[in-house]
Image: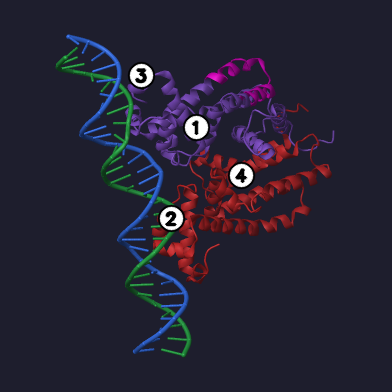
Chain colours: A purple, B red, C blue, D green
DNA sequence: TGACAATGTGACCACATGATCATATAATAA
DNA sequence: TTATTATATGATCATGTGGTCACATTGTCA
């Protein structure tokens, strides 16, 4: 956690530092991201930085915590209305909400995308203080719940499905890169929604021609 | 491409350099991977390194070329017998062959896994001289072919399915990390095969309970 | 043997990194 | 005003980076 000094800072200065850090950490992995660059971008002296943060990792964990908190807050409303929906509607809502989140907070989304690429295990485990892995268990919970209700074919492997669903986010990113050359949730909103539906169609109905 | 000097080297020395480089580039991204470390590991002087390679990128592209060549050679036999197989059998063979490849050449597989994480666009495009993207077009080809034969439900979006299939490789990796804590194709070969079948089951049949 | 080319070598360069610290400045309180 | 505390600063440190280069070593042919 940052020092008290950091939180005593005027709001604009503090948020300038935060956004500079988010910018840096979303463009490069932890090792490549540069404290110097963050200082330059936010116009603070090197010495000041180390008065606010114990070290680089301290800042990184703090930034990631902000992103995770924001994401949880954003998704909490979705989870609340889950019990009224079918499994397809649940998944659909979840992914569309994910797209919406990335559109509203592209910086946070890029941060998460970068985090999935992170190689340094000690850095990863410093961020995961049970914060991140919950998305996996959320899927497993939904799956088992739906299985109990008979919504899912019992022959489906829960773990396989869970991992498949987790990867759908980055698949949507790849789709955008393939289509527009860059990750941009602003343009072609409709196309993205259709693509999400295409993916869910495959997962729910399979690809095999039924001849029925 | 490396200098002629490099290829004049005694075989054991040359392959020592190659394996040292593969080791380094499979453990860290391009930026973090260190020329110094590669020199130390392979017991050559810094000066020698730069007599063999124009620069760091020259070596990296060379190493990746080796990996891609090996992979193509490994998979060529598979493609040859495709026409005798159904789509499910084709996919199944493709992924099991992928698992086999990763087991036989874990270094190459790790190299590829690392490459997918690469941030530096100039480094990526230096490797992709149309060499890499072919896996995507292979899937698209298979899909359209199967659609023409009526094997695939025509409502399935080809691009969505293609991207889904591309991600299955890393999903298998995630499965192993989830199960064994590390990417290791040696142990539990049977379990991995079963998992591949679970994934293919979902993709072919969907998850929805049919009540039929 | 001597001459010439091919290889090997590690000190060295400029630069960037994360982090430190003595000092300067500002803010507050007596 | 003075004393005290909180904050800002950038030169400096040790270390690592990719890359260079003058020189030493080796191999080859006459």
**Chain designation of label 4:** B
SS class, disc 3: helix
Residue assigned mark 1: A23
Could you tell me how far apart the alpha carbons at marks 2 and 1 are, in whole angstroms? 28 Å
**Mainly helix, strand or loop, the magenta region?**
helix
Determine whether label 4 and label 2 are within 8 Å by CB: no
SS class, disc 1: helix
Q: Quadrant of residue B84?
A: bottom right
Residue assigned mark 2: B35
Q: Nearer the viewer, mark 3 or mark 4?
A: 3
User: Looking at the figure, which quarter contains the C terminus of chain A?
Assistant: top right
Residue assigned mark 4: B169
**Chain designation of label 3:** A
Q: Position of residue B40 (x, y in %)?
A: 38, 58
Which stretch appears magenta? A73-97
Left or right, B4 with respect to D13, comes to right
Around disc 4, counting alpha carbons within 10 Å, would you say few (fewer than 14), some (14 to 19), or many (20 or more)? some
Residue B188 visible in the current orientation: no
Q: Nearer the viewer, mark 2 or mark 1?
A: 1
Q: Nearer the viewer, mark 4 or mark 2?
A: 2
Of the numbered discs 3 and 1, the one sitting upstream in the chain is 3
Could you tell me how far apart the alpha carbons at marks 4 and 1 are, in whole angstroms? 30 Å
The numbered dot on residue A8 is 3
SS class, disc 4: helix
Q: Nearer the viewer, mark 3 or mark 2?
A: 3
Q: Residue shown at 55%/47% (left/top)?
A: B113
SS class, disc 2: helix
Q: Position of residue B155 (x, y in %)?
A: 79, 34
């Amino acid at each position: 956690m940052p020092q008290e000094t950091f939180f005593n800072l005027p709001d604009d200065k503090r948020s300038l530092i935060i956004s500079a850090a988010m910018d840096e950490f979303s463009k490069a992995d932890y090792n490549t991201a540069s404290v110097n660059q963050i200082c330059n971008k936010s116009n603070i002296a090197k010495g000041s930085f180390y008065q606010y943060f114990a070290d680089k990792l301290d800042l990184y964990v703090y930034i990631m915590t902000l992103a995770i908190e924001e994401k949880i807050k954003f998704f909490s409303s979705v989870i609340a209305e889950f019990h009224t929906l079918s499994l397809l509607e649940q998944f659909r809502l979840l992914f569309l909400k994910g797209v919406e989140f990335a559109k509203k907070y592209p910086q946070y989304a890029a941060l998460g995308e970068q985090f999935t690429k992170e190689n340094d295990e000690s850095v990863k485990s410093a961020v995961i203080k049970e914060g991140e892995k919950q998305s996996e268990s959320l899927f497993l919970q939904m799956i088992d719940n739906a299985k109990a209700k008979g919504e899912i074919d019992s022959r489906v492997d829960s773990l396989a499905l869970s991992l498949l669903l987790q990867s759908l986010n980055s698949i949507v990113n790849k789709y955008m890169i393939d289509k527009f050359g860059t990750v941009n949730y602003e343009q072609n909103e409709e196309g993205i929604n259709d693509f999400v539906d295409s993916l869910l169609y495959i997962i729910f109905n399979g690809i095999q021609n039924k001849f029925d």
